[in-house]
Image (cartoon, grey):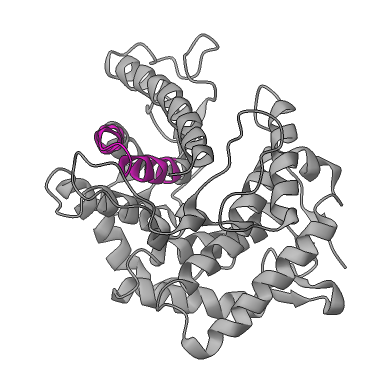
Amino acid sequence: MSGKADAWLSDRIACSGDLSHRLNECSSQRAEGELSNRWQPANPCRYPFSYAHYNAVWLYALYCLAQVDPSYRQRAIDMVKASHSCFIVKGRGIWWKIYADGSGPEPGRGFGGLDHYKLYVMYRLLDPGRTVLGSEIADVEELVMKDYRRFDCSQDLGLGMILWAAHFFPEEAWARTVAARCLDRLEEMWVDKGAHGGYFARAPWARNVLVVFANCGVGMGLQAALSTSLVPPGQAGAWHARIARMHSYLEKHVGDDDEYAEKAITWVMLCNSRFPGWLCVGNVPRLADAGAKAVPATTSTSMPSMSSGAPSAPAGGVDAAYASAMGKLAGAVTRQPAQPGVTSASGHK
């Protein structure tokens, strides 16, 4: 890999080590009963709750790092073993949000409508032979197989994330079914703004509502799906064009809501949509064997370093908008509050 890619990877490994340490502290203290009083300020975890979606995304990050250093696969497996029973109610669903100590779901919250799909994919990526996560895979597989034929989602970000999840197994019936329904619904939710571009509405009944980071999630999911057979060849050109028009519109309107412009999630997601890289499974490097150093499948997977200031664009050629978004991200990260806030949606008439 290039020097910049190595620097970027070193930064990410350092970050993963810190986060894994925090997760392990929480897991061990939960096992010893030390976190039985729910959330306390002295707890090692920064936030009082954990989302199943965030677990799934973190597992994917560890999966990617495992292609460079195989020890990360065991970290991910340990995380599944520690968290799976906290999130699942067998045969019924996945709790959308639980206490960080794993002691139960957040009061007033129910099952996530999509989390079983994402966890199913991540568990299978980590253990394709089902030798160590066989029971965990079976638990979420049961939920997916019961649900996918009646799958119906009407939220922008949810549609993007399910397209992303489906692209890992594009030949399987459940993936093809949910992907086709996602594409149909996104077709319905596209808002064409003429020469200015366009965006995906928050929901079919909220066509005037634009959520920037959620549109970026749609962009990620569409690009992942377009890298597989999930999108019919005759439709691919239209979807590529919409992605480009969406990016154009978002770059003009991302600052319309002052709160959005201050949130790191906006810029993280914009960067991911502009340059999905390893979020598309075909770009993830593969180890030749357990002891080999990974070699990227394509030069476009090289990543910029974020160790200081605004990074340069990654190898493979990315336009100025990506570099600008990375710079905004670096600034937004330094302004984040101690606790997460709630962002509001911008209204676009």
In the visual, does 73 lie left or right of 41?
Answer: left
The furthest residue to the front: 3
Q: Nearer the viewer, residue 137 or 288?
A: 288
Main secondary structure of the magenta stretch: helix
Between 37 and 299, the residue placed more toward the observer is 299
- Judge whether 283 appears above or below 73 on screen: below
Q: Is residue 44 above or below residue 146?
A: above
Question: What x and y, as percent, mark residue 325?
Answer: 72, 47
> Does residue 64 show up magenta in the picture?
yes
Direction from residue 230 to residue 203 in the image, left or right: right
Q: Is residue 237 magenta?
A: no
Question: Residue 310 sits in which quadrant?
Answer: top right
Horizontal and vertical percent position of residue 54: 47, 41
Number of marks present in the image shown = 0
Quarter of the N terminus within the rendering = top left
Q: Residue at x 31, y 33 (%)?
A: 79
Residue at the farthest top position: 42
Residue 39 at what x, y percent from top left? 50, 19
**Which residue is pictured at 28% across the width and 31% down the height?**
82
- Front position in the image: 285 or 127: 285
- Residue 106 shows in the view: no
Q: Which residue appears at 75% of the width and 47% of the height?
A: 324
Q: Residue at x 35, y 67 (%)?
A: 147
Q: Position of residue 334 (x, y in %)?
A: 71, 26
Q: The magenta stretch spans which residues?
A: 55-81
Residue 64 located left or right of residue 208: left
Q: Is residue 57 visible?
A: yes
